Amino acid sequence: MAKDRKIDLVILGLLFHEDLTGYDIKKRIDGAISFFWKGSFGSIYPALSDMEKFGLVEKYRAETNGRREKILYHITDKGIDALKEWLNVEQAANDLKYETLLKLYFGGAGDNDTALKNIRYFEEQVKRDLAVLRIYKENLEKVLDQKDHVYYYLTVTFGIDTYEAYLKWCDRAGKILGGVQHFGDGADIRQ
Amino acid sequence: MAKDRKIDLVILGLLFHEDLTGYDIKKRIDGAISFFWKGSFGSIYPALSDMEKFGLVEKYRAETNGRREKILYHITDKGIDALKEWLNVEQAANDLKYETLLKLYFGGAGDNDTALKNIRYFEEQVKRDLAVLRIYKENLEKVLDQKDHVYYYLTVTFGIDTYEAYLKWCDRAGKILGGVQHFGDGADIRQ
DNA sequence: ATCAGCATGTAAGGCGTTACATGATTCA
DNA sequence: TGAATCATGTAACGCCTTACATGCTGAT
């Protein structure tokens, strides 16, 4: 398996539960996973191909009842071992790139309204995403008796908790920047 | 300027305030910015070189009082325009890769203790980072009368607010997964 | 004397995205 | 009939990291 290609682990994790096509994998990634990891066809298909060569997955053609042929992938024992080995490594790269914060940090190069506008835009995005996450949460709460669903539930609540924190921050940030604009000088914004 | 190379904007943002060497830029990025953006020498030096060709920055040699020569970069008017143009684009790519959540999502492939251990490792990291952010915050509160410091302050409070949300989540997640004895001591989330 | 930090770069290579290319099926 | 979705890939290219290469300066 490629040394640092995390998409491999995403695929193995998904295949651990069921056999899937490359297209299916893309759809799964675009669901709840997309809040903390992304993947494109251009990375999925080559990864599947490489992993087959390494013996981590096996491919087979689905029964075609007159329909178009699909290529399904199945995780091998070696693939399961690789997945578990990864889970057992404590080290995890949480790599965050917030362009919104970058723009805010350098906000002094523009005017106050621009910074406010960028926060509002971020806030709208977060609200939309939060609504989706809440629907995921509601659906998962109905099926929490199944073991894996607890893990899914926890990732969704992570998203909800952090997004709610984002919204509170947006509110306060908006007031602080609004205040600066209103009162001109450095009003005391200490908490 | 390269189409999607965000390091260019980080550099322009930093140069907007003062002339810096490539080495200085790296140090700045490794400070408060590193919580939401990263950069290596291998990306900084080529970016400076390219931007000079495009006329966004100008380089000059610092006065050498017998010391080793430094190459300082200065932002041009064209560079300032590029920076402002970027600030005025609402669209911002917030690209998050949480390997911790990926491991948790696929936790069903391992055992419960592994998932708990991974959350605990994440928690320790967050606590360390949070301590650093709180120091930044305290220092910024002393100098909030300067315009730019409000922007720095807001990015730091963003980090603190979300990290505090992370810790609360870690606590609840630990309890749900059954690690009460390990997580019961309570995260430090004083406000 | 040696080690950490200052300082500037290059090279190799990996990872990933976007766009392209193709074609079947399903539904309005 | 046309659009959306299903389905599988390849190609070009860009961004970035890691490691390498080099050498000075200041402190202990």
Image: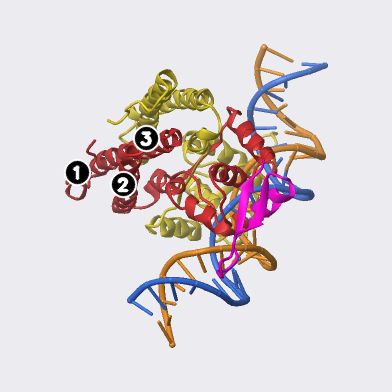
Chain colours: A yellow, B red, C orange, D blue
User: Within the image, what quadrant is residue B154 found in?
Assistant: top left
The amino acid sitting under disc 1 is: Gly
**Label 2 vs 1, first from the N-terminus:** 2
Mark 1, residue position:
B186
Question: What whole-number distance in Å separates the C-alpha atoms at marks 2 and 1?
Answer: 21 Å
In which quadrant will I find the C terminus of chain B?
top left
Subunit bearing disc 1:
B
Report the residue at 38% width, 47% height from top.
B107
The amino acid sitting under disc 3 is: Leu
Q: Give the range drawn in magenta.
A: B48-76
**Label 1 vs 3, first from the N-terminus:** 3
Subunit bearing disc 2:
B
As drawn, A21 above or below A178: below
Depth-wise, is mark 2 or mark 1 nearer the camera? 2
**Label 2 vs 3, first from the N-terminus:** 2
Under circle 3, the secondary element is: loop
Q: Position of residue B7 (x, y in %)?
A: 59, 47
Q: Which of the labelled discs sits on residue B144, or is there none?
A: 3
Q: Which of the labelled discs sits on residue B135, or is there none?
A: 2
Taking the image as shown, residue B76 lies to the left or right of residue B179, namely right
Crowdedness near tag 1: few (<14), some (14–19) or many (≥20) residues, C-alpha within 10 Å: few
Q: Position of residue A98 (x, y in %)?
A: 50, 39
* Residue B112 can be seen in this image: yes
Under circle 1, the secondary element is: loop
The magenta stretch spans residue B53: yes
Report the residue at 40% width, 27% height from top.
A173
